[in-house]
């Protein structure tokens, strides 16, 4: 490292001439500017990397089913002998649900059911998907 850029003690600074002191101050100022420039560059690089990772994760986690179909709801009047499992077999679409339990969980939440018990004459709402747009 050049001796000019090294930090000097107060005794060395006091013994400098005006020209040496001026050159030393300029050298320190340039060093600080270089350090700040490097810090700004490092911050920008880290911020860009973090933003890239966040955007990549957000984009990859967005799974849209809009191009496959539209979600609709239908109300069904429960008849004698119907079970929630049998009704779910008629309306479930495994392209949108991982398994029957996830579909039944949604049905229970929508209809405020505590378990799979349903009664004849009861009306429940069931979600289903269709490829055609209905308005």
Image (tube, rainbow, N blue to C red):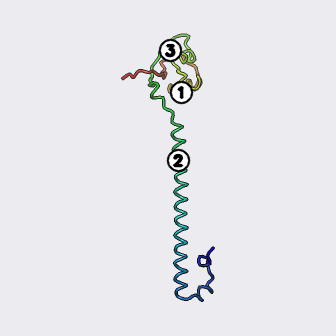
Please report the residue visible at 53 percent of the width from the left and 81 percent of the height from the top.
Answer: 23
Please report the residue visible at 52 percent of the width from the left and 83 percent of the height from the top.
Answer: 22
Residue at the top extreme of this rendering: 80
Q: Which residue is mark 2?
A: 52
Q: Earlier in the sequence, mark 1 or mark 3?
A: 3
- In the rendered image, which quarter is residue 132 located in? top left
Marks 1 and 2 sit apart, C-alpha to C-alpha, by: 34 Å
From the viewer's perspective, is residue 39 above or below residue 59? below
Tell me the SS state at disc 1.
helix
From the viewer's perspective, is residue 55 above or below residue 95? below
Percent of width and height locating residue 24: 55, 80
Please report the residue visible at 53 percent of the width from the left and 16 percent of the height from the top.
Answer: 87
In front here: 77 or 66?
Answer: 66
Single out the mark in the foreground, 1 or 3: 1
Asked if disc 1 and disc 2 are in contact, CB closer than 8 Å, the reply is no
Q: Which residue is mark 3?
A: 78
Marks 2 and 3 sit apart, C-alpha to C-alpha, by: 51 Å
Tell me the SS state at disc 3.
loop
Q: Which residue is mark 1?
A: 106
Single out the mark in the foreground, 1 or 2: 2
Asked if disc 1 and disc 3 are in contact, CB closer than 8 Å, the reply is no
Q: Mark 3 Cα within 10 Å, few/some/many (few <14, many 20+)? A: some
Image check: 99 left or right of 79? right
């Amino acid at each position: 490292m050049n001796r000019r850029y090294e930090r000097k003690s107060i005794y060395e600074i006091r013994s400098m001439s005006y020209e040496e002191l001026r050159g030393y101050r300029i050298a320190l100022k340039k060093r600080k500017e270089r350090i700040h420039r490097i810090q700004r560059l490092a911050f920008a690089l880290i911020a860009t990397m973090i933003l890239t990772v966040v955007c990549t994760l957000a984009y990859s986690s967005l799974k849209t089913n809009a191009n496959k179909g539209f979600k609709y709801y239908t109300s069904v009047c429960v008849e004698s002998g119907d079970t929630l499992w049998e009704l779910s077999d008629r309306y479930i679409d495994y392209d949108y649900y991982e398994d029957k339990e996830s579909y039944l969980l949604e049905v229970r939440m929508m209809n405020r059911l505590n378990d799979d018990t349903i009664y004849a004459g009861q009306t429940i709402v069931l979600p289903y998907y269709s490829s055609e747009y209905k308005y």
